[in-house]
Image (cartoon, grey):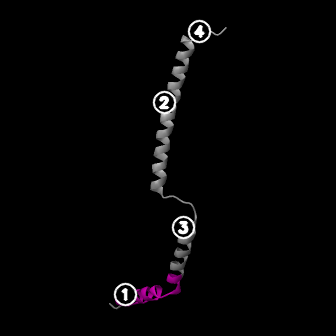
Amino acid sequence: MTTPRILDEIGAKVSELVANSPVRDVEKNLKAVLSGAFGKLDLVTREEFEVQREMLAHARQRLTELEARVAALESERQGTAAPKA
């Protein structure tokens, strides 16, 4: 059976041609150009985004708590304050 052997040889030749083809160079150059373009943009990583999102959620929760506390203190103050004449 020479067919599997021929197929292996053809596969090896195709792999060799692809490895030496200009397509690989174009791919490398394109990656370099895109990396440079993305480097100039003000982008953040997913991890940085998630950290900032958690910090914002915590700040929102704290703000809600403080707003409720201020509202309670204001209502307390209005209830005990003497009416102005």
Which label lies toward us, 1 or 2? 2
Q: Mainly helix, strand or loop, the magenta region? A: helix
Tell me whether circle 1 and circle 4 mark residues in contact (CB < 8 Å). no
Quadrant that contains the N terminus: bottom left
Tell me whether circle 2 and circle 4 mark residues in contact (CB < 8 Å). no
Name the residue at 48% across, 58% down: 45
Q: How far across and how far down the image is residue 32, in percent?
A: 52, 75
Q: Where is mark 2, residue-wise? A: 65
Vertical order, 52 against 21 (above or below): above
Residue 15 is left or right of residue 63, and the answer is: left
Say what secondary structure mark 1 lies in: helix
Which label lies toward us, 1 or 4? 4
Report the magenta residues as a range. Answer: 3-25
Vertical order, 1 against 54 (above or below): below
Q: Where is mark 4, residue-wise? A: 82
Q: Distance of mark 3 from mark 4, alpha carbons?
A: 63 Å
Q: Label 1 is placed on what type of residue?
A: Asp
Q: Distance of mark 3 from mark 1, alpha carbons?
A: 42 Å
Q: Distance of mark 3 from mark 2, alpha carbons?
A: 40 Å
